[in-house]
Each structure stands twice: as C-alpha cells, then as structure tokens.
C-alpha cells in the first residue's frame, strides 16, 4: 500500500488475488485528507455492483455513480462509473481550462486497454489525466506490464510501480472427463524442459479411438450424466463454456433428463428466486425459470436480458446453482466463481471464423475456477470431442498471458473535443504521448506511430473543415462546438442530420427508430424473413438516409466508415416505443432479448447527447427526452435495488 502514496501503480494479478482490497485501501487513504477518488469500470453492471459495495463500505453519502443512465450523488468524494464517463469529464475539464476535480483514479480491468472496440478510451484517460492525479490500475495478469509502466513514466513524468502477482489464491487442477464417466488427471510428469505433459492414461485414451460408454468421440456429452459425476466427487457448482448461445440453451434441456434437486434445495432456491423476482417481476414468466427452480441450472449469455443474467449471477454467488452454461466470448464478463469450469472446445468463433483460444482467453475462463475462502483447489474439466485439441490445452495451461496492445485510433468525437482546447499542433503533441507511438518508435519502424496517427488526425480535420465543422486553422466553428458534445459512434452524421433538419420531428418514436438504425452495427442477415415494421418506419429511415446521401458519400470518398442503415432495428424500436409487448416485438423482428435490450440502451445513450442540446435544438432535445422515457422501461432496464441481500 505504501507504493500507492508514492507513485502510480499497475497491479497485475489473477482473479481472486485481492485487487479489490487494494482499491478499497487506496480509497481510504485518499478520503482521510479530504480528497476525491474516481473508480472507473468497463461495464455498467460492474459499476452498479461496485457502487453498492462501496456504499456499504464508505456510506451512501460518500459514494456516487455516473454511468450515463444513472447519475446519483455526482459530487460525492467517491465516484464509481464507466471509463467513458471519466474520459468525457477529462474532455470537459480541458475545454473549460480547468483540472479535473479528483485526486485518485482507479482503472479497474485495465487490460481493457487492449479491447479492439473500447481500448482507445482507456488509453485516452491515461494520456489526458494530469500527473498530479494518482493513478492505480488493476488488471488481470498481463505479459508486458513493465512496458506499460515505462510508457506511463515517460508521459506522466513520475514513477509507475508494477505490483505483480502470479500465484493463484486457489490452485488450478486440470482434469479430463473420460467418456466412461471416469475423471483422470490431465497432466502427468513434466517433460525434460519442465513443460507440462499429458498424463499417460490420457495419451492412451487419445490414441485408442475406442467407443465410449457415456459419449462417443465427436458427440456432445450428456450434461445430466456429467453433472451426476461432478456431484459424486463434490466438484459442483460448475461453469460450462460452450460455443454458442443456442448450445447454452439446449444444454438446459439435456439437464432435465437427470435427477431434480432435493426438495430442501428446491425450497431454498425458490425462496431466493422469489426475493430476486420481487425486484424485477417481469422475469416471472421467463421461459427458463422452471428449469432453474427444479434442476438448479441456468444459461448466461449475451442473448439474455441483463436482469436475468443478474439473477443467475446472484444465485450462483449464493451457491444455490449446480451449473451455469455460458459462451466463451463472455468469459471475461462472468461475475461469479465456481468450484469447476468445464471446457468443450479449444477454439472459439471470432465473428468470422473459428480460431484457437489464446492464452489470455483460456486464463479468463480458468480464472473462474475455485472460490476463494471456500475451495482449496479449483478444477478445470476438459471434455474431449471433435472441437477439443488436448495438446493445445496443455500448452495454454503453462502459456504466459497475452500482452496489451495499443488500440488508439482517431475518430471525429476525439478530434472535435481536443480541438476545443488545443491547437492542431498541440493535439499532435498529445498523440505523440500514445502507447502506439512510444512502442513503434522503439521498434525502429520506418514510419513511426506518431506519423501514422498525425496523418489520420489531419485527414479528420480536413474533412471537418470542408464541411463547416472547423475553421481552416482547426478551431471548431459554432456547429463544431455543439457537435463535439455528441460523444457517440457517428457524431458528424448525427450532427449533419440535426443541422439539416433531416431527423424526424414531431414524433419521438420515429426519432428513436432512426437513431436505432444509426447505432445498429451488426451485419444484415439476408436469410431473415421478418416483418419489416410499419411503412412509416421504412419511409422515415429511407428519407433520412437519402437526405444525408451526399454527406455520407463524401465520407466514403475520404475512406471514413459509413454503415448502411437497416429497417429491422428501427422497426423493433418503433414497436417497443409504441407499447408492443416485449416478447412479441422480439419474436416479430427476430431479436434475441439481450440483443434487443442492448439496442435500446445504446440508442438511449445517443438520444441523451441530443437531449443536452437544448439551446441549439430545443424541439429535438425535447423529443429525445420523450423517446428515452418510452424505451427505457422493464425489461430493458432492471429496477434499481440492492440484489446482494
């Protein structure tokens, strides 16, 4: 703890190694002299959880939360919120010529800096944060912590200490589930160079190719049989990581072929479910509720409602479930441990093709094995099959974690906000502080990271000048100044829609529909044959797209990304805003509930930025506020409450 008072710190440690304790102690030390702390999280759900936790620890009056859709006690000495909100506060402070009113910033899950979509926000925070503000970063184990610290020392002109812990509080023991129902140690004696090796029995199994009693090679194991084996050896609860959402949901059906929970267990589980559903009664008709109550199993993936996933997490944390089936892509977001994690695949789908698991992804999954204070050992159960390469898994067990890579990139929101408080030359100096620039300069590339970033920055500035958002000297015009407050995915497209009057007026639902079409970034599925919604929705989307066509064509000509607008998300939004039943709308427009909820939340985030432009566009700001009220209702958002009791 002494290091925190003397320098910036990067704490890198496995899950459950006590990083949260370090954060709490750092906040205590910050509060004692009357200073302020900011705790930044990558996810809103994690922000809500930390807000409840810190409110208990420090008192309700001491803690506030800022996540976009929640703003409570914003002047409190301890603020919990998303990293994007912290970045936006740094933008505002720079624009106002002030320093941010905080003395300690804690970046939780700092390895998100390597996230392709959102990592740029973490790097921006590190670049913009005044050096007088103490910086504490909490991360999973990473390979290049020393290089991150060296870069930060260069740009912040102060020491950055790396606190590294590689020891797991709960040791991991890998097992192989033999198709006969027998559990074998996966690893045997180490090789000549100290590398782990497959156990001899496992090697014989791999090479035997005989038919098996419980599951043949290449067939999906019977989950009810697997659970009975794990229960026999006291290896429950378990988290099964499967390939797809559909696999997770199908696994529940297979579990119903086995024995139900004992009546006593069902009674305890029913009592806790009842308490949780009292806070979110719309989930009382959830299609998986009966399986949850009788068999103590649940699915947890991105296609489900946030409220349902929270219920599953709370029940698992209270040790009332036997198993949870989750997709490997959400392994990092699973907010609960288990005694055992089970893997059926050594690869994953990256959105385009199946690729082998990386060491980081493998460690994210196995990091959930073993409950601190409850288990002396955590188990990683490997289930053989056609998608499981056992030798690759052995290599992953001993493989070092992945390195953090810079995801810094130029975008219009960044450029507009920086130009509010910096000249173009000053912005270029800021870009020279990026991790990408620092790293490439040290690798002696022919073209440095600075040159790459500056060229892209100039390309953005030139476009803003050409279209009236900036003066030739780079200073934002009147339009550029209010457009800078649109901190959204496509700010110049939204701004162009506002200043040309192309966004629908007089109808809040149609405004929400157009914004939904703008934020929806998934590839269209031509195989879907669903009701495209009312003709009015289709007309308003097409009208907006046609009105902005010259502008978007100019963007495309300059090689800026422009997404085609789709009617399906707009029609889903319109139906929900106008009062159609949630499940009916999701079914009619072929949306998984979790995807539909995410669409509503992202659309509301964009509408909030329009709502704040009351001076420039009073009528549109009013409509945006109405639209937000129409779409943010259960089950899109769960009622605010303390689920931890």
Image (spheres, helix red, strand yellow):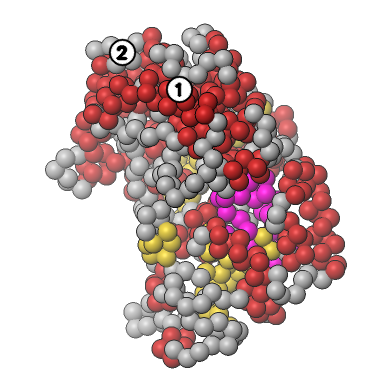
- Image check: 147 left or right of 230? left
Instruction: Indicate which disc, 2 or 1, sits on the residue closer to the N terminus.
Output: 2
Q: Is residue 351 above or below residue 446?
A: below
- The residue lying at 63 percent from left, 46 percent from top is 305
Q: Is residue 599 above or below residue 287?
A: above
Report the Cα–Cα distance between label 2 and label 1.
16 Å
- The residue lying at 61 percent from left, 49 percent from top is 304
Q: How many marks?
A: 2
Q: Nearer the viewer, residue 224 or 7?
A: 224
Provide residue 251's location: percent of width, then percent of height. Answer: 61, 66
- The residue lying at 51 percent from left, 60 percent from top is 244
- Residue 287 lies in quadrant: bottom right
- Residue 157 lies in quadrant: top left
Question: What is the magenta range?
Answer: 299-326
Provide residue 102's location: percent of width, then percent of height. Answer: 54, 27
Q: Nearer the viewer, residue 370 or 99?
A: 370
Provide residue 356's location: percent of width, then percent of height. Answer: 38, 65
Q: Is 15 part of what is drawn in magenta? A: no
Answer whether residue 606 is visible to the viewer in this image. no
Q: Nearer the viewer, residue 243 or 487?
A: 243
Q: Which residue is mark 2?
A: 468
Answer whether residue 272 is visible to the viewer in this image. yes
Q: Which residue is mark 1?
A: 486
Mark 2 Cα-neighbour bin, 10 Å: few <14, some 14–19, many ≥20: some
Label 2: element kind: loop
Q: Is 324 part of what is drawn in magenta? A: yes
Q: Is residue 170 above or below residue 39?
A: below
Label 1: element kind: loop
Mark 1 Cα-neighbour bin, 10 Å: few <14, some 14–19, many ≥20: many
């Amino acid at each position: 703890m002494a290091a925190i008072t003397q320098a910036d710190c990067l704490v890198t440690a496995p899950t459950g190694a006590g990083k949260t304790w370090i954060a709490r102690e750092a906040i205590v030390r910050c509060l004692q002299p009357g200073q302020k702390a900011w705790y930044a999280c990558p996810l809103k759900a994690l922000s809500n959880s930390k807000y409840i936790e810190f409110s208990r620890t420090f008192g309700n009056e001491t803690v506030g939360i800022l996540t976009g859709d929640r703003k409570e006690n914003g002047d409190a000495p301890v603020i919990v919120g998303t990293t994007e909100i912290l970045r936006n506060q740094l933008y505002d402070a720079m624009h106002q010529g002030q320093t941010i009113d905080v003395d300690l910033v804690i970046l939780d899950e700092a390895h998100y800096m390597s996230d392709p979509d959102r990592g740029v926000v973490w790097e921006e925070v590190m670049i913009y944060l005044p050096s007088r503000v103490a910086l504490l970063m909490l991360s999973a184990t990473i390979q290049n912590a020393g290089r991150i610290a060296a870069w930060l020392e260069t740009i912040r002109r102060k020491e950055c200490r790396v606190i590294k812990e590689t020891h797991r509080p709960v040791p991991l023991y890998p097992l192989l589930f033999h198709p006969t129902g027998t559990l074998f140690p996966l690893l045997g004696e180490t090789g000549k160079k100290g590398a782990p090796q497959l156990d001899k029995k496992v090697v014989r199994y791999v090479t035997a190719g005989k038919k098996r009693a419980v599951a043949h090679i290449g067939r999906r194991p019977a989950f009810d049989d697997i659970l009975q084996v794990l229960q026999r050896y006291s290896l429950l609860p378990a988290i099964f990581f499967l390939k797809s959402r559909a696999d997770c949901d199908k696994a529940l059906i297979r579990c119903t072929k086995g024995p139900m929970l004992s009546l006593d267990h069902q009674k305890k589980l029913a009592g806790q479910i009842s308490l949780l559903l009292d806070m979110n009664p719309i989930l009382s008709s959830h299609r998986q509720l009966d399986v949850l109550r009788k068999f103590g199993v649940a699915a947890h993936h991105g296609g489900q409602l946030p409220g349902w996933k929270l219920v599953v997490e709370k029940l698992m944390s209270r040790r009332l479930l036997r198993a949870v089936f989750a997709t490997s892509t959400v392994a990092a977001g699973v907010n609960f441990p288990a005694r055992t994690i089970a893997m059926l695949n050594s690869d994953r789908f990256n959105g385009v093709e199946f690729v082998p698991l990386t060491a980081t992804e493998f460690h994210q999954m196995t990091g959930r094995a073993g409950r601190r204070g409850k288990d002396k050992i955590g188990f990683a159960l490997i289930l053989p099959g056609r998608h499981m390469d056992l030798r690759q898994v052995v290599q992953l067990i001993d493989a070092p974690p992945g390195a953090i890579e810079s995801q810094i990139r130029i975008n219009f929101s960044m450029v507009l906000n920086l130009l509010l408080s910096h000249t173009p030359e000053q912005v270029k100096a800021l870009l020279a502080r990026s991790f990408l620039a620092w790293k490439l300069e040290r690798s002696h590339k022919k073209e440095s990271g600075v040159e790459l970033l500056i060229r892209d920055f100039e390309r953005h500035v030139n476009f803003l000048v050409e279209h009236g958002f900036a003066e030739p000297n780079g200073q934002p015009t009147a339009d550029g100044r209010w457009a800078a407050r649109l901190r959204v995915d496509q700010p110049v497209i939204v701004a162009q829609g506002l200043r040309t009057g192309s966004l629908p007026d007089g109808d809040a639902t149609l405004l929400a529909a157009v914004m939904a079409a703008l934020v929806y970034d998934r590839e269209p599925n031509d195989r879907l044959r669903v009701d495209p919604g009312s003709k009015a929705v289709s007309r308003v989307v097409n009208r907006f797209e046609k009105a902005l066509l010259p502008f978007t064509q100019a963007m495309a000509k300059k090689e800026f990304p422009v997404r085609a607008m789709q009617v399906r998300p707009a029609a889903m939004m319109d139906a929900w805003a106008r009062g159609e039943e949630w499940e009916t709308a999701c079914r009619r427009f072929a949306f998984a509930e979790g995807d539909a909820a995410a669409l509503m939340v992202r659309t509301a985030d964009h509408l909030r930025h329009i709502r704040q432009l009351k001076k420039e566009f009073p009528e549109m700001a009013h409509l945006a506020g109405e639209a937000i009220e129409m779409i943010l209702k259960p089950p899109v958002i769960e009622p605010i409450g303390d689920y931890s009791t």
